[in-house]
Image (tube, rainbow, N blue to C red):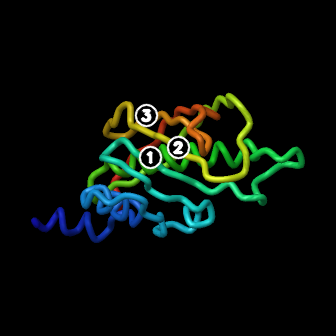
Amino acid sequence: MDEKTAEASAKDNETRRFVADAIAAEKRDVPLTCNPAFISMGAILVDGQAGDVLLSFVADEGTAQGNGVVNGGTMAAMLDTAMAVAVLSALRPGQTCATISLNVNMLRAGKIGRLYVRAGVEKLGGRVAFAHAQLLSEDRMPLATASSSLAVWDIN
């Protein structure tokens, strides 16, 4: 490893490194314990490759509205998280990202339980990445779709 690569690796985004390592090792059903937000959502990397991931989340009773369905903000957070993981999985060591814009379309109500998000990178540029995602129920019915743009930068 050259000096520049070693320096970038030392300054790496821990979430990027965790996800990239799991994907490189072809691990499945990996709890995403690398990030407190992911832990609180019960996030699991079900499967993936660089730029394309399937995550699962737990929508518990604390995420439900009075009418018994999962809050739209919770569903949007799951979509946003999965798109960020997809982009992070495609970045090189020493890079990170953050959401610039998020567009969500709700298709049907989500129910308490395990939900899935398939997310992928549409384009990875030098400063901006574009991603898409679909939120699925436990029985894999589409609940919502999303697209986002994410700023990409080197960690200094």
Element assignment for label 2: strand
In the picture, the quarter occupied by the N terminus is bottom left
Name the disc covering residue 54, or none.
1
Relative to 65, is 122 on the left or the right? Answer: left
Residue most extreme to the front: 139
Dot 3 crowding, Cα within 10 Å, few <14, some 14–19, many 20+: many
Q: Answer above or below: position of 119 versus 155.
A: above
Residue at 25% from the left image edge and 57% from the top image edge:
24
Ranked by sequence position, the earlier of labels 3 and 1 is 1
Ranked by sequence position, the earlier of labels 2 and 3 is 2
Residue at 64% from the left image edge and 43% from the top image edge:
76
In the picture, the quarter occupied by the C terminus is bottom left
Instruction: Return the residue at label 3.
Output: 130
Element assignment for label 3: strand
Q: Is residue 122 visible?
A: yes
Name the disc covering residue 117, or none.
2
Relative to 37, is 55 on the left or the right? Answer: left
